[in-house]
Amino acid sequence: DTGVSQDPRHKITKRGQNVTFRCDPISEHNRLYWYRQTLGQGPEFLTYFQNEAQLEKSRLLSDRFSAERPKGSFSTLEIQRTEQGDSAMYLCASSTWTGVAGANVLTFGAGSRLTVL
Amino acid sequence: AQSVAQPEDQVNVAEGNPLTVKCTYSVSGNPYLFWYVQYPNRGLQFLLKYITGDNLVKGSYGFEAEFNKSQTSFHLKKPSALVSDSALYFCAVRDMEDTDKLIFGTGTRLQVFP
């Protein structure tokens, strides 16, 4: 068990470019989550998956954001036409579904920091 | 709307002294409450959670938290602080029933001085 891996750890891009982040969860975890954290704030929920199904998506996630988990293993988060306001740490987490919503313990990755110039 | 508040941006404590990091919550329904800790360049790590049962919850690294329904609080405590406890601590609450979404507080930086 190598934990939750995120790649890249840091991405610097110019406004208007597209970026993609990858998350590899703990292999036996069937739930995967994306959160966003800006400086001085706590993580904000973006979306989560059970296996390959995207179960919930935050209103924070504009049409420029899309997340996938095609085979129920790794996930990607793509941001199209990046804006300076997208600069943040993007956190991925995974868990095992316990049958009780909201009771799961999340294991987080170290995050992918996005800087949009 | 559900929310949590961490009223202190920073807590300073001397090594060996007890520490408390405060959290209050506002929810409709039964609160599911969590504490996570964030070390530099590392992911958030789970410390403990309250779902139901005993109001005093024991967690990792000697931390504990007391659920107080009348005061809508879930303060994190440790009897004797270590320098290595210095980190950013987040309180979180389940958004609402039938969702797996957590709402996090803004975090409290704990600084333990030798």
Image (cartoon, coloured by chain):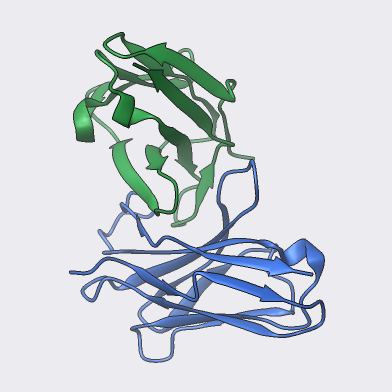
Chain colours: A blue, B green
Q: Is residue A66 left or right of residue B89?
A: right
Q: What's the residue at 67%, 73% (across, down)?
A: A12
Q: What's the residue at 44%, 47% (across, down)?
A: B40
Q: What's the residue at 34%, 47% (across, down)?
A: B45
Where residue A96 sits in the image (x, y, percent)?
26, 64
Kindly give the residue lying farthest to the top in the view shown: B17
Q: Is residue B37 left or right of residue B78?
A: right
Where residue B6 sits in the image (x, y, percent)?
56, 26
The answer, for residue A50, to whether it is visible in the render is yes
Q: What's the residue at 49%, 69% (across, down)?
A: A9
Q: In which quadrant of the rendered view does residue B50 lie?
A: top left
> Looking at the picture, does residue A23 appear above or below residue B82?
below
> Looking at the picture, does residue B85 appear above or below residue B37?
above
Q: In which quadrant of the rendered view does residue B17 lie?
A: top left
Which quarter shows the C terminus of chain B? top left
> Looking at the picture, does residue A106 appear above or below residue A69?
above
Q: Is residue A70 left or right of residue B2?
A: left
Name the foreground residue: A109 vs B25. Answer: A109
The answer, for residue B50, to whether it is visible in the render is no
Where residue A106 sits in the image (x, y, percent)?
35, 55
Name the foreground residue: A28 vs A79. Answer: A79
Where residue B82 sits in the image (x, y, percent)?
28, 22
Kindly give the residue lying farthest to the bottom in the view shown: A71
Q: In which quadrant of the rendered view does residue A36 lie?
A: bottom right
Which quarter shows the N terminus of chain B? top right
